[in-house]
């Protein structure tokens, strides 16, 4: 640490992820001198609470970043494209939560427990990308397995919470549940279909290969973070009527044999991972238990009896915390500890 306190900007401070950023900065006691809160015209003058202060929200513009050391962005991909370069130009290091820069070869894509060494590459463009929520929580438990026995292929299906689509989606689910209970018509705007009492195999837009962008984020980001272009990944991403917490069924084929007991042992020491795996007592990771928690929960670990070297895992994390705000703040912590 070269300074004792840092000037931090949060772009998208009024959103679901922005609010979690403030919460995480406070909970982890990030050393802040000035906190600058930025959002759209709609929020100018609105006040947000941080520690014992009330801070007024300012308009996000190219001039917002004078004297800022770290800029945390979660205002959507097009705002990141429009304003992150200006923030970097002004001398801030940007940690971007959107998909805008993730696959740019000059921009590091980082999960601090998995590839912290990549953070040093921020010097190229002044921007570090935060991976997609579903990728982050999958790679935490896979990292120690990858290091020990190698991973050839991953087959993942996700069960993703509506909070990943922002505050309006949470309202849509709640309104539909109330309408259903009252015998009224279910109205949808955020999603193309009813989300209450339903599962939508459709997150982000469809591509020519039949996959969604969300599915291809998991494929491409995994390869970039593991620095392994040979790893096979296939994903099906599904929106489910859960408010907080993404769940994932992860099936892997390893290069060498590993037993379920050995995987459980690895999980006990894996950074950021909490092993919850006692089926006899009905204990396994649940979305309703992960809300507000920093750990990624892993359970239902068992051998895939259909192939020689296969393992199944059930992985659950708070998509707004480890999937977005916490991971971004952890990157900022490494930055101030080692680099700025
Ligand atoms: P949200 O609740 O809808 O909040 C959106 C935020 O962006 C609000 O603060 C909003 O400000 C701001 N914003 C929108 N348009 C703007 C503009 N033209 N100029 C300045 N600010 C603008 O969404 P969210 O769930 O927090 O997600 C925000 C972004 O974070 C997403 O679009 C995505 O890129 C990223 N994200 C990443 C992950 C991940 O997996 N890493 C997960 C979720 C989200 P107002 O309140 O003033 O409108
Ligand atoms: C999660 O501006 C946008 O369209 C953002 C949409 C979005 C993203 C994204 O693509 O950045 C919403 C929720 C993500 C993400 O993490 O990839």
Image (cartoon, rainbow, N blue to C red):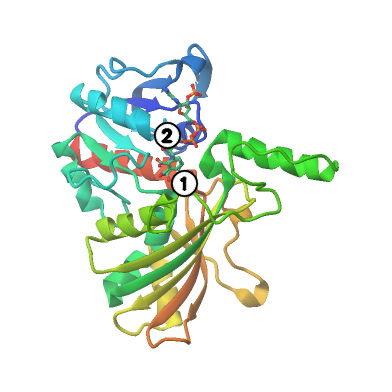
Residue 324 horizontal side relative to residue 332, left or right: right
Q: Which residue is mark 2?
A: 25
Q: Is residue 59 above or below residue 233?
A: above
Q: Give the image location of residue 330, x and y in percent.
A: 35, 44
The quadrant of the picture occupied by the N terminus is top left
Callout 1 crowding tier (Cα within 10 Å): few <14, some 14–19, many ≥20: few
Residue 106 horizontal side relative to residue 281, left or right: left
Q: Give the image location of residue 94, x and y in percent.
A: 28, 33
Does residue 63 appear in this view?
A: yes
Tell me, for residue 326, which label it has, or none: none
Among all residues in the image, which is located at the extreme top? 45
Does residue 31 appear in this view?
A: no
Q: Nearer the viewer, mark 2 or mark 1?
A: 1
Among all residues in the image, which is located at the extreme right? 183
Q: Which quadrant of the view contains residue 163?
A: top right
Q: Nearer the viewer, residue 80 or 254?
A: 80
Q: Give the image location of residue 203, x and y in percent.
A: 50, 50
Q: Nearer the viewer, residue 44 or 101?
A: 101
Residue name at image x 33 percent, y 78 percent? 254
The quadrant of the picture occupied by the C terminus is top left
| Kind of element beneath mark 1 | loop
Query: Which image quarter has ligand 2?
Result: top left
Q: Nearer the viewer, residue 327 or 136?
A: 136
Residue 91 horizontal side relative to residue 157, left or right: left
Residue name at image x 33 percent, y 65 percent? 143
Q: Which residue is mark 1?
A: 204
Q: Which quadrant of the view contains residue 28?
A: top left
Q: State yes or no: Cβ of the residue under disc 1 lies below 8 Å from any atom of ligand 2.
A: yes
Q: Nearer the viewer, residue 173 or 318?
A: 173
Q: Which quadrant of the view contains residue 208?
A: bottom left
Callout 2 crowding tier (Cα within 10 Å): few <14, some 14–19, many ≥20: many
């Amino acid at each position: 640490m070269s300074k004792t306190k840092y000037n931090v900007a949060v772009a998208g401070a009024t959103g679901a992820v922005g609010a979690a950023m403030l919460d995480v900065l406070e909970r982890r006691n990030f050393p802040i001198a000035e906190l600058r809160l930025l959002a759209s015209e709609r929020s100018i003058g609105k006040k947000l609470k941080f520690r014992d202060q009330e801070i007024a929200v300012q308009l996000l513009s190219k001039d917002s970043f004078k004297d800022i050391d770290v800029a945390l962005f979660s205002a959507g991909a097009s705002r990141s494209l429009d304003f992150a370069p200006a923030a970097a130009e002004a001398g801030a290091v940007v940690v971007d939560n959107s998909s805008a820069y993730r696959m740019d070869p000059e921009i590091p894509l980082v999960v601090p427990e998995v590839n912290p060494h990549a953070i040093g590459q921020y010097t190229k463009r002044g921007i570090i990308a935060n991976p997609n929520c579903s990728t982050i929580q999958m790679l935490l438990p896979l990292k120690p397995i990858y290091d020990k026995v190698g991973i050839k292929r991953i087959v993942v299906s996700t069960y993703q919470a509506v909070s990943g689509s922002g505050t309006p989606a949470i309202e849509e689910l709640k309104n539909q549940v109330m309408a259903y209970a009252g015998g009224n018509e279910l109205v949808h705007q955020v999603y193309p279909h009813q989300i209450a009492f339903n599962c939508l195999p459709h997150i982000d837009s469809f591509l020519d290969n039949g996959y969604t962008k969300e599915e291809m984020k998991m494929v491409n980001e995994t390869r970039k973070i593991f620095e392994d272009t040979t790893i096979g990944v296939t994903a099906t991403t599904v929106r489910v009527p859960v408010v907080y917490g993404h769940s994932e069924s992860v099936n892997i084929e390893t290069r060498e044999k590993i037993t379920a007991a050995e995987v459980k042992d690895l999980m006990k020491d894996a950074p950021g991972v909490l092993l919850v795996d006692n089926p006899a007592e009905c204990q396994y990771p649940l979305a309703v238990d992960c809300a507000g928690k920093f750990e990624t929960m892993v359970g239902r670990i068992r051998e895939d009896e259909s192939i020689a070297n296969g393992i199944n895992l059930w992985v659950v994390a708070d998509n707004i915390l480890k999937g977005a705000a916490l991971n971004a703040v952890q990157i900022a912590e490494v930055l101030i500890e080692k680099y700025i």
